[in-house]
Image (cartoon, helix red, strand yellow):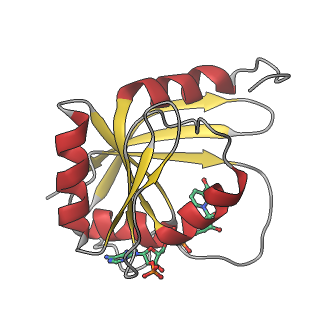
Amino acid sequence: MAGGQSKADDESVRENFNRAAAYVMGRRTFDEGERGWPDPPQFRAPVFVLTSTPREPWVRQGGTTFTFVTEDVEFALARAREAAAGKDVQIPGGAHTVRQYLDAGLVDELQIHLSPIVLSKGVRLFDHVPPEIALEPTCAIHSPGVTHLTYQVVRP
Ligand SMILES: NC(=O)c1ccc[n+]([C@@H]2O[C@H](COP(=O)([O-])OP(=O)(O)OC[C@H]3O[C@@H](n4cnc5c(N)ncnc54)[C@H](OP(=O)(O)O)[C@@H]3O)[C@@H](O)[C@H]2O)c1
């Protein structure tokens, strides 16, 4: 964004946005973004929002339309895959949504962007995820504020 600084984190963030051509997120993650994301939002691609409450699509500038999906996680992923046309689908969160995709065996790669901030409470990312899933580290990028960790998800 305008006025920002260039840091070691930039490459990680830039690469992620370049690789993804569609997104799936949970409604609570969307709620925070609806209040805070600029227009155009950073996604510049279709975003499918899982929710149990139907809502008309929210069209923003720059190629981002938020489409609300009331079916299951597989259906939302299928819509996103179709929109991505062979490029990556990214699931930016939150934890409730990510762990359903892990549980369903639908995640190829997991990225954790770890900040040294102690919150003392929150949703556990791996609760109920089957222990058969293994994580193989493939990349770690350090900066003073964030450690970017990438794992390949290995399924039995
Ligand atoms: N630190 C980070 O990088 C990061 C990233 C993302 C999010 N966050 C934070 O995480 C928090 C939200 O995460 P969260 O885990 O609480 O929630 P979430 O996964 O973002 O959203 C959960 C909501 O998504 C909908 N949903 C999920 N699975 C569904 C399904 N199978 N069918 C229908 N609807 C489904 C439901 O919405 P309805 O209630 O509408 O039915 C559910 O209440 C926010 O505070 C956000 O800022 C942090």
Q: Is residue 53 above or below residue 18?
A: below
Residue at image point 58% right, 39% down: 41
Q: From this viewpoint, which residue is outermost toward the right?
A: 3
Left or right: 99 in relation to 94 = left
Tell me the quarter of the picture where residue 72 sits. Answer: bottom left
Q: State the image coordinates of residue 138 (x, y, percent, origin top left).
A: 40, 33
| Quadrant (top left, top right, bottom left, bottom right) of the N terminus | top right
Residue at image point 18% right, 64% down: 75
Q: Is residue 115 above or below residue 125?
A: above
Left or right: 115 in relation to 53 = right
| Quadrant (top left, top right, bottom left, bottom right) of the C terminus | bottom left
Left or right: 63 in relation to 39 = left
Residue at image point 34% right, 41% down: 22
Q: State the image coordinates of residue 107 (x, y, percent, origin top left).
A: 28, 52
Residue at image point 49% right, 59% down: 93
Tally the marks. Answer: 0
Q: State the image coordinates of residue 87 (x, y, percent, origin top left).
A: 25, 30
